[in-house]
Image (spheres, rainbow, N blue to C red):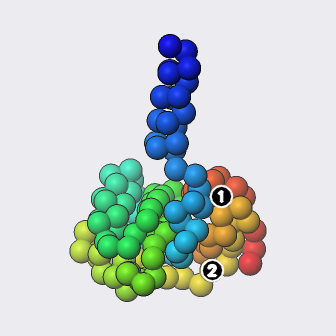
Amino acid sequence: MGAWVAALALALVSVLTPALGSAESTGEALTLEIPGLTCANCEIKVEDAVTAVTGVRSVKASAPTKVVVIFYDPAQAGPEEFIRTIYRVGYIAYVSPPAYRCAPCGVVYPAPGECILCQAELTAS
């Protein structure tokens, strides 16, 4: 029985904990600034809306940093569609010039701080 429980636990971990960069690495990453992102409910609202766009692989919004990071297939979706989708749920989003990069993830951010995906410290680009 112990082997069965271990196998089940391993299967659940592999399903419930996606590896950073696995599905995302086959597409592109986009960071959008959203000045009106102020709370956890805002994060959920934006994440749910953007996740529904065809071609989106994963989405992570952060109220403290006021950004959303979107991993997507550029053949199916793009920045304009994400900005329109976010606008439809009540927020203004825009692409800003990347100034800081997360070395482990490769995601770019407009301001210093830490990566909302892996919590690594950002470095100037």
- Horizontal side of 6 relative to 39 (left or right) equals right
Q: Position of residue 94 (x, y in %)?
A: 44, 81
Query: Does 121 appear above or below 71?
Result: above
Looking at the image, which residue is at 55% across and 72% down?
A: 26
Q: Position of residue 75 (x, y in %)?
A: 42, 84
Which amino acid, by three-letter code, is at mark 2?
A: Pro
Q: Secondary structure at mark 2?
A: loop
Q: Position of residue 124 (x, y in %)?
A: 75, 74
Q: Disc 2 marks which residue?
A: 98
Which amino acid, by three-letter code, is at mark 1?
A: Glu
- Residue 86 sits in quarter: bottom left
Looking at the image, which residue is at 68% across and 73% down?
A: 100
Residue in front for this viewpoint, 14 or 122? 14
How crowded is the residue under tag 2: few (<14 C-alpha within 10 Å), some, or many (20+)? some
Residue at the far top in the pictured view: 1
* Residue 22 visible to an observer of this rendering: yes
Residue in front for this viewpoint, 118 or 111? 118
Query: Does 80 appear above or below 36?
Result: below
- Horizontal side of 65 relative to 56 (left or right) equals right
Q: Are marks 1 and 2 in contact (CB under 8 Å)?
A: no
Q: Disc 1 marks which residue?
A: 114
Residue in front for this viewpoint, 122 or 8? 8
Q: Position of residue 54 (x, y in %)?
A: 32, 73
N-terminal-most mark, 1 or 2 = 2
Q: Secondary structure at mark 1?
A: loop
Looking at the image, which residue is at 24% across and 74% down?
A: 88
**Image quarter (top left, top right, bottom left or bottom right) of the C terminus:** bottom right
Query: Does 94 appear above or below 109?
Result: below
- Residue 97 sits in quarter: bottom right
How crowded is the residue under tag 1: few (<14 C-alpha within 10 Å), some, or many (20+)? some
Looking at the image, which residue is at 38% across and 73% down?
A: 55
Tell me the CA gap for discs 1 and 2: 14 Å
